[in-house]
Amino acid sequence: MKWFDEMKDKVSQKWSEFTDEIWGPDTSLGQMMEASAAINTQMESLNFKLSKREIAFGLYLDAHDTQIARRGNLAIDAEAHAGSPTPPSYLVEVLLWYVDFVDWAYGAACNQFDSEHRGTEEDQLREKLDTRGYELVTLELEPRKDKPAHFIAFNHADKLCLLVVCGTKSAADGLTNATVLNEELYEGGPVCHQGMARGARWIAERYRSLFSHVFAPAQYKLVCCGHSLGAGTAALVTMLMNAKYNLSSECFAFATPACVSATSTVDETVTTVVLRDDIVPRASVYNVYQKLVELRQLDWNEVAKGKWIEDSLRQDVSDTEFVLEKATSWARNSMTDIAEKNKTRDPLTPVEGLERLIPPGNIIHLYQAEHENVESYHASILEADSPVLSIRGSYGMMADHKIEGYKEALEAIHTRQAGPQTPVSSPRKTDKPRPPPPPPPQKTWKVFVLFAMISSLIAYRGRLLVSEWL
């Protein structure tokens, strides 16, 4: 019957719209599902087959509990950081200075770029760099396998060479692209995330002559920066340059994934920044597996009966009470289905010998001392094994990965420390703040490079003459 088929099509369409609304990227549950799918991809490489909905609902429950705890005690995060050292104010200023460069590395995806600009992405990047006294040396816009997008620029007045590595475009990409395979960064070096280690070696080898024969003889310091997977790669480039090539380098990394073995020595030249509940720095295979073992202990039949699911969905489903009722019923049925399927699944137990990776260097955590007050951001230095850095479900765990959030938090801290009218200055070294940068150099980088190469050659010939004379 035609009328029946038409009615069935309408119902099917409405149901599709309904499920899209629940699982869409604009809802917390949809973001949990996005994280769940990426986590599942990681674990499948270890031959662990897991339920995406089990992970998503587990994180959703965790997020609900986290929010209830924070609303019940607005200072709960401040209490969790009690006793942790605070980074010096100049370091906050340095981080705020470099966070824009990291944002610019995303090119057209950067919200600071003008979509109506008549020039190319490179033109806009050059203009942005010019405002900070930097000149572009080279730019790779398109990433390839184990060859990340990046750019190199220099500041002649402050004698800084800047390498900025672009990350992936979303938090989900940052998780999905992660591999569980690890390898030594260099022979006898620390065990690292394989993909980022290969990217770091490619960059180091490609520009080693530029760094060592051009910038180093002219006493330029190499600074590496990045966000997400770009942060991990930038950190490993710094470790390579310092340990293997004896080139002075430091790194400021934002939302850095766990990419260095927990047994390796902390590299003091690397500073990692983690914002609130950002999942990417926490989502090591080790941490993920521990979280899954915890979730598997849940009695999903009892969890499904709780009022928490209705309270949580009320925030996500912006529709009628009828839709909310249907969404709640569907969610409860999904969780009882998880309980039924878990009866036939193999139990999860902690895996012995699983390599534990952590974010590199000194870790700075940005948190709200008062819940939902963006002006209350503080910073603390944490150990990698701090409970604060374990995986915990949060409604902001995906949004906290965005570079804009990092900048907002650093601006709030800088404003409180230095005052709202205090401009951020150009750092020559991290031992003290610097005055605003001078106008950009008049010489092009090519002329500078040629001059530096000639100077290096003259110095080399001079050493030969001295050795012959001796």
Image (cartoon, helix red, strand yellow):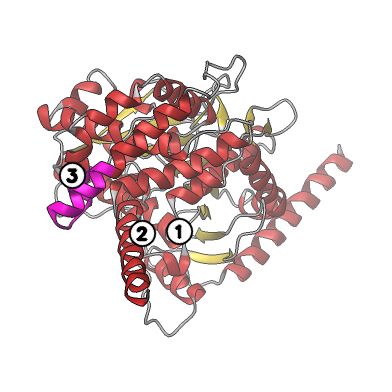
Which mark, residue 437? 2
Residue 82 drawn at (x, y percent):
22, 20
Q: Circle 3 sits on which residue?
A: 418
Q: Residues within 10 Å of mark 2 (few under 14, many from 20)?
A: some
> Can I make out residue 354 in this image?
yes
Residue 332 drawn at (x, y percent):
29, 37
* Closest to the observer, 260 or 174: 174
How would you classify the magenta stretch by its main secondary structure?
helix
SS for dot 1: loop
Q: Quadrant of the C terminus?
A: top right
Q: Residue at x 17, y 32 (%)?
A: 307
Q: Residues within 10 Å of mark 1 (few under 14, many from 20)?
A: some
**Amino acid type, callout 1:** Ala
**Residue interval drawn in magenta:** 313-329
Q: Taking 76 as reference, is 229 left or right? A: right
Disc 2 to disc 3, how far (Cα)?
A: 18 Å
Residue 111 drawn above or below residue 265: below
Q: Residue at x 66, y 36 (%)?
A: 246
Earlier in the chain: of badge 1 and badge 3, it is 1
* Closest to the observer, 54 or 241: 54
322 within the magenta span:
yes
* Closest to the observer, 463 or 19: 19
Count all numbered tags in the image, as a single digit: 3
**Amino acid type, callout 2:** Pro
Q: Residues within 10 Å of mark 3 (few under 14, many from 20)?
A: some
Residue extending farthest to the right is 468
Which mark, residue 96? none
